[in-house]
Every structure is written in C-alpha cells, then in structure tokens.
Image (cartoon, rainbow, N blue to C red):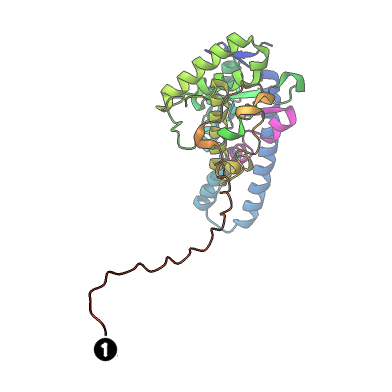
Amino acid sequence: MSELVTGEAVALELRPARLPSRALAVLLDLAATMAAYIAVTLALVAATASLDDAAQTAISIAVFVLVLVGAPIAVETLSHGRSLGKLACGLRVVRDDGGPIRFRHALVRGLIGVIEILLTLGVVACIASLVSARGRRLGDVFAGTLVVRERMPAAQTGHVPPPPPWLAGRFSGLDLSAVPDGLWLAVRQYLTRMQQLDPQVGWSMAERLATDVAERTGTPVPQGVPPAAYLAAVVQERQAREARRAFGGAPNGARGASGGDAHSGAAGPGGGYTSAGFPPAPMPSAERPPVPPADPPPAVPSAAPQEAPPAERPSTGFVPPA
C-alpha cells in the first residue's frame, strides 16, 4: 500500500484505510447502534402503550433519527473521528490535511451515510470505496475527510519539531484563514522529514513554502528568521488555535507565548535552535533582554569649601557716631 502524495510532492505518512477494514468497522458500529436502538424502542413501547397510534409513530421516527443518525454523529464529533468500530480496527476519520474533524464533517458524513449505508445496505458505499483511489465513500468526498490507519509502526511516523523558544507566540496575530489545507499538509510533512533532505534542497523547499505561507497571510517573513523556524512557529500557532477551538482553553504549549519565559529555551549563541534541526539565527534586537546599566563610580567627597575673606571696601570718609 503506497503512501499518500500531495500536490507539492510531499509524502503523507498516514495511510488510507481500505474496504475490508472499513467494512468491519462499519459492521461493528451498526451492531452497537442497532442494539441501542432495539433497547430504546422496547423501553419506549412499554412506556407509551397508552398513547394513540399517531403519537407512537412520531416517537418511533424521533428514536430512529436520534439513535441511528444523531448518535453516530455525536460519537464521531466527541471522539475526533474514532467510533467504536474504528477504534477496534485501528482507524480514524481525519480531514484531507490530516487534522481532526469537527462537527460539520461528522454531520455531512452521517447524513450521507444514511443513504449510502442504511437505505442501500452499503452497496453505494462499497462501490464508491472501490472506485476511489483513497478508499473514500461519498460521505468522505462531500465532507472533505479521509479514513486512515491510525496504528502505524513508530519508525514510520514523523514528529513535527517545535519552533525556537524566541519565536513562541510571535505570530499570534497572523490571519491563517486563507492558507489552504494542501499547503498546511506540505509544510507539516516538510518539517517532519527535513532531516532526511539534502541541506541545500531542504533550504530551498523551506524558502518556497515560507514564501507561499507569507503570501496567503499577507505578512512577510520577519528578517533574520530562518524559513524552517518560521514554518514551525506558524504550524504551532495553527495547532494552538485548533486546540483552543476544540477544547475551549489555551493549551499548555501555548502558555509560554504570553509568559515571560519565552527566551528560557534558546540554545546556542545568537538564539540558534540546532537541536531541532533549524539553522542558527541571530536573536532580534526587540527580543533581547535589556542590559542593566553599569553602576556609577562612587562619589569622592570633596573638601568643605573655605569661607573667603571679606573684601576690603573703599573708604567713603564717613565715620559712624560713637
């Protein structure tokens, strides 16, 4: 099974799930959902036996919508793409750029899944998954999602290095809404594999990606900041915003952006961050801590001024009376 390759010729380490594993995950989800639906239906039949037929029909429709449609959407939203069947098969639903899904993605997948899975007994979903190069069904195509294999060997997964500490929180005011998902994916994959690239090739790729990101944000790359470090800082800022949007609070990694310890992790002379693979760069003058002024020399006590003798006044010829 080959890895995904984006339009920027960057390989994606997450591999798409194929039809057998997805079918097994769907069967497990359907078994759990049908068990819950039958249990809720039996309980409501016993509780609403005294109602008329119209009320019982309305309640049955509401239970069908809530349990068979609403419950899977809520589970995928709260678990960020991991339903019971997907968790058992080691699968997960992600966005096209590899990020976690949101409510709108789960809603589109759930509504279209009613047609292509429940009403057609999965025939439409199987055909779409076989035709698609990434094994996506119609719900994935319209929602912009992808089901991937989450359980991968540790050697095949990449790690996005953190930016230099002196860049933490510096790009909190950038407008990242115009950056497309494909460019984010290319930046993230470059950061995970920049150590495997030739230095000159890696530097040129970083400059090109940094220029593309700067054009989308409308703010040029700060002078003196290496392109790879700039990309890592922008990616960290986007991840911090995603975490705040998903969990409603500031993540631990973003607290240093506003605190006073943003310079505590700078390594090497001039603020370089070579431990993560970034080329050293001089620390901007605005980020350097102020140098305390030198103590002034102690004052030498001067001698007490001597009183000058009174000057002799010229005689006026006037003698005061006795």
Q: Residue furthest bottom?
A: 322
Q: Bounds of the magenta span?
A: 72-93
In the rendered image, which quarter contains the C terminus? Answer: bottom left
Residue that lies at the very extreme toward the left in this rendered image: 317
Provide residue 312's location: percent of width, then percent of height: 34, 68
Packing grade of label 1 (10 A; few <14, some 14-19, many >=20) is few
| Residue for badge 1 | 321
Q: Where residue 47 sits in the image (x, y, percent)? A: 62, 57
- Residue 84 quadrant: top right
Q: Is residue 83 magenta?
A: yes
Residue 123 vs residue 257, the one in the foreground: 257
Residue at the image position 53 percent from the left and 46 percent from the top: 62
Q: Position of residue 81 (x, y in %)?
A: 62, 33
**Quick check: 106 above or below 60?**
above
Q: Nearer the viewer, residue 116 or 290?
A: 290
Could you say whether the residue bearing mark 1 is in a helix, strand or loop? loop
Residue 30 magenta: no
Q: Amino acid at mark 1?
A: Pro
Task: State left or right for residue 20 relative to residue 114.
Answer: right
**Quarter in which the N terminus is drawn:** top right
- Answer whether residue 67 is visible to the viewer in this image: no
Q: Tell me: residue 220, above or below residue 80.
A: above
Vertically, is 307 above or below 56? Answer: below
In the rendering, at what x and y percent does residue 99 appear? 58, 29
Specify whether residue 112 is in view.
Answer: yes
Q: Nearer the viewer, residue 178 or 83?
A: 178
Q: Quadrant of residue 157?
A: top right
Say which residue appears at 62% left-offset and 52% top-offset.
Answer: 44
